[in-house]
Image (tube, rainbow, N blue to C red):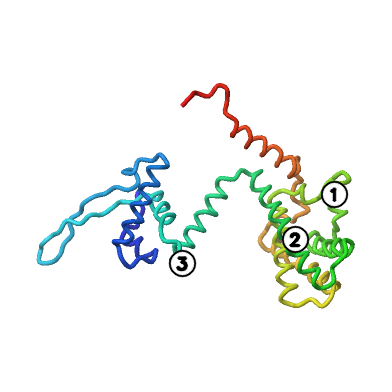
Amino acid sequence: MASSIGPRELAVVLGYTEYRKFKRTIERAEKACEGSGHVISNHFAHVSEMVSIGSGAQREVEDIHLSRYACYLIVQNADPEKPIVALGQTYFASQTRMHELTDDQRRIEMREAVTEHGKQLKAVASEVGVVTARDFATFTDHGYMGLYAGEKARDIHARKGLKKGQHILDWMGYEELADNMFRQVQAEGRIRREGAVDRDDANRIHREVGKKVRQTIAEMGGTMPEGLPTPTESVQQLRAREQKRIEAERTPSLWSEEP
């Protein structure tokens, strides 16, 4: 399917002032198209069109009908120093990544994100007196109590029916993990902005942020985190299964045909 924008229009949108330079970008995109196994003419249809130049005269002008895939390749091969190109490349990369991931992979990545944001939140909290393991457990509980209507970590653990040593974050689905990551990010930002003076202040802010996230979920008509189902597999089990899949793909099959 052809796109609704021509190459010259696309050049302007992407910040190119000279079409001559943009043509080199198109050439790189065509090579990428061919290299990925696609037929170039299916996505970059070079045509000649007659355009009026005044007084009834016409002139032949070269044009290219671009498919959506062609536009994607052009953006990916354009000059990343141009702001709109950089934004486009970042957008396509994130969208492609999300479409490629399975539900399990998305959950694994979100769990890793929660871990990283947890470290950042802990670092900020430590600057205002949340130092010991007990301090941090109390600080974390305040965030949970705000988000889970009073439930502490041990209450969530019990409600999920987990065994001793099983971490509640490893038994959360993608949506519940995302709720908690939002809580972490907002708590970190607010503690920095307000300049919490001590650990009691940090605990207060964390609980208030948890409540605000819960309120936002309610206003959007979402499911409260305690109402979301507990997965049947932990994140560790998903990681182990994913690793086996990756290793299997790397190992050539005995029945595969020789190239």
Is residue 56 rendered to the left or right of residue 42? Answer: left
**First of labels 2, 3 by sequence position:** 3
Residue shown at the point (69%, 37%) measured from the top left: 241
Residue to which mark 3 is pinned: 83
- Cβ–Cβ under 8 Å for marks 2 and 3: no
**First of labels 1, 2 by sequence position:** 2
Residue shown at the point (75%, 68%) measured from the top left: 209
Amino acid type of disc 1? Arg
Judged by depth in the image, the label closer to the viewer, 1 or 2, is: 2
Judged by depth in the image, the label closer to the viewer, 3 or 1, is: 3
Q: Nearer the viewer, residue 226 or 190?
A: 190
Residue shown at the point (86%, 61%) measured from the top left: 137
Is residue 83 rendered to the left or right of residue 229? Answer: left
Q: How many marks?
A: 3
Task: List x then y, in percent, for residue 186.
Answer: 71, 67
Name the image quarter holding residue 201: bottom right
Name the image quarter holding residue 243: top right
Task: List x then y, in percent, for residue 216.
Answer: 69, 64
Question: Mark 2: which secondary structure?
Answer: helix
**First of labels 3, 1 by sequence position:** 3
Label 1 neighbour load within 10 Å: few <14, some 14-19, many 20+? few
Task: List x then y, in percent, for residue 108.
Answer: 68, 47
Residue to which mark 1 is pinned: 159
Task: List x then y, in percent, for residue 105.
Answer: 64, 45
Q: CA distance from mark 3 to mark 1?
A: 48 Å
Amino acid type of disc 3? Pro
Label 3 neighbour load within 10 Å: few <14, some 14-19, many 20+? few
Residue to which mark 2 is pinned: 119
Question: Mark 3: which secondary structure?
Answer: helix
Q: CA distance from mark 2 to mark 3?
A: 31 Å
- Cβ–Cβ under 8 Å for marks 1 and 2: no
